[in-house]
């Protein structure tokens, strides 16, 4: 993942927000910033100024290792025809509610 | 002389309205998209504080003027803001240095006013204190980076600090209006804020590898309605719509 773009020479950071209520952090978007404190502030200003979050993580984009579109086949498709990998052949015990 | 507490609320509200407007001039012109949003956020915070304070001022005055009447229908001579906040926005370094100097002052002022005998103002202060802490953090961290950045950013931050220093004295000047209110616990003695302000400013200026300017002649006049030529021009732009189309709604 490139850490620079043509119109902004500052490094790119990925922003993760934890919503109120305690759910896990979720990816919200990205910001450009010179260092981690400024990235945190930019994330707050761009993504969390209307009470969207109780916690923010920022991570240098170049520290994220991502799968590529070419990985789609070998990574994910072999699972599609192996229904037995899904726990759907078990009888649900009485009294357990399935939502 | 109008009612002292009304006068005091105008000082508080006008500082924030004028600085909020100056800061809003960065909207669409910030150095990066992120900083454009950050500066505009702070501008909105300040205008929001001014809205609440001037609303309270209108109630205290009791002459039927609301916050819009006070903001849009007073002349520069009737404005009570300190001179520092009305100066043109300058370059990014200048706006950041001014924001840091003012926000540090405002933060200590709100902290003290949280215990104000007027519960309306105490409530506004408690709410504003939180956001003013962020304003200090944002401008202080930028100042440290400008000072410790390139020769150019260091030089521009230093020039801004030297230019603005002569306007800091007015923030801590107290007078009879204020002193009468201090006794009733309606106002904070501005001179009592100077020591903590100076401690905070000296700390960040040192981190920014800048030098605190020497105290020389201090410019004053804003609290009595004597302003620079810049305020009238700013108000002409800020007030043009309500003055041209009285009562306009959208």
Image (cartoon, rainbow, N blue to C red):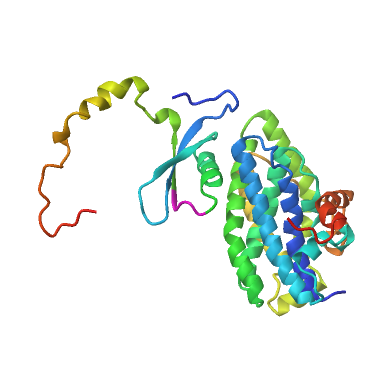
Magenta span includes A53: yes
Residue, far bottom: B184
Q: Quadrant of residue B168?
A: bottom right
Residue A80 at x, y percent in the picture: 22, 29
Whether residue A99 is visible here, answered yes or no, is: yes
B48 to B179, vertically: above or below: above
- Whether residue B46 sits left or right of residue A2 in the image: it is right
**Residue at the image point whose x is 73% and y is 55% from the top:** B250
**Residue at the image point whose x is 77% and y is 77% from the top:** B180
Q: Nearer the viewer, residue A85 or B220?
A: A85
Residue B42 at x, y percent in the picture: 64, 50
Assign the N terminus of chain A to one quadrant of the image.
Answer: top left
Q: From the image, give the main secondary structure of the stretch colored magenta.
A: loop
- Whether residue A91 sits left or right of residue B104 in the image: it is left
Assign the C terminus of chain A to one quadrant of the image.
Answer: bottom left
Which region is colored magenta?
A51-55
Residue B125 at x, y percent in the picture: 63, 66
A83 to B48, vertically: above or below: above
Whether residue B217 is visible here, answered yes or no, is: no
Residue, far top: A70
- Whether residue B176 sits left or right of residue B123 in the image: it is right
Q: Quadrant of residue B205?
A: top right
Residue B17 at x, y percent in the picture: 74, 57
**Residue at the image point whose x is 70% and y is 45% from the top:** B97
Q: Nearer the viewer, residue B161 or A33?
A: A33
Magenta span includes B217: no
Q: Quadrant of residue A78?
A: top left
């Amino acid at each position: 993942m490139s850490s620079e773009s043509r119109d902004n020479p500052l490094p790119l950071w990925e922003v993760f927000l934890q919503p109120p209520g305690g759910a896990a952090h979720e990816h919200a978007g990205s910001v450009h910033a010179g260092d981690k404190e400024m990235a945190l502030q930019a994330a707050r200003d761009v993504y969390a100024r209307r009470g969207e979050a109780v916690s923010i993580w920022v991570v240098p984009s170049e520290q994220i290792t991502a799968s590529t579109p070419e990985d789609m086949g070998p990574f994910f498709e072999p699972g599609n025809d192996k229904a037995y990998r899904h726990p759907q052949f078990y009888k649900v015990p009485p009294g357990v509610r399935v939502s | 002389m109008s009612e002292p507490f009304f006068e005091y609320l105008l000082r508080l509200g006008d500082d924030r309205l004028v600085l909020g407007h100056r800061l809003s001039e960065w909207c669409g012109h910030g150095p990066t998209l992120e900083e454009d949003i950050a500066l505009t956020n702070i501008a909105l915070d300040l205008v929001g504080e001014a809205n609440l304070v001037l609303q309270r001022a209108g109630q205290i005055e009791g002459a039927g003027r609301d916050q819009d009447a006070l903001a849009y229908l007073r002349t520069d001579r009737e404005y009570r803001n300190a001179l520092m906040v009305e100066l043109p926005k300058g370059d990014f370094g200048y706006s950041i240095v001014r924001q840091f100097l003012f926000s540090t002052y405002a933060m200590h002022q709100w902290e003290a006013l949280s215990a104000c005998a007027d519960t309306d103002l105490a409530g506004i202060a408690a709410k504003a204190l939180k956001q003013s802490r962020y304003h200090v953090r944002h401008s202080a961290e930028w100042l440290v980076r400008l000072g410790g950045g390139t020769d150019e950013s260091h030089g521009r931050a230093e020039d801004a600090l030297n230019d603005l220093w002569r306007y800091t004295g007015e923030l801590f000047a107290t007078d009879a209006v204020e002193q009468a209110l201090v006794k009733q616990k309606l106002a904070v003695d501005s001179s009592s804020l100077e020591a903590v302000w100076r401690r905070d400013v000296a700390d960040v200026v040192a981190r920014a590898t800048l030098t605190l300017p020497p105290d020389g002649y201090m410019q004053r006049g804003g609290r009595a309605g004597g302003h620079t030529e810049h305020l009238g021009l700013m108000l002409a732009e800020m007030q043009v719509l309500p003055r041209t189309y009285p009562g306009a709604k959208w």
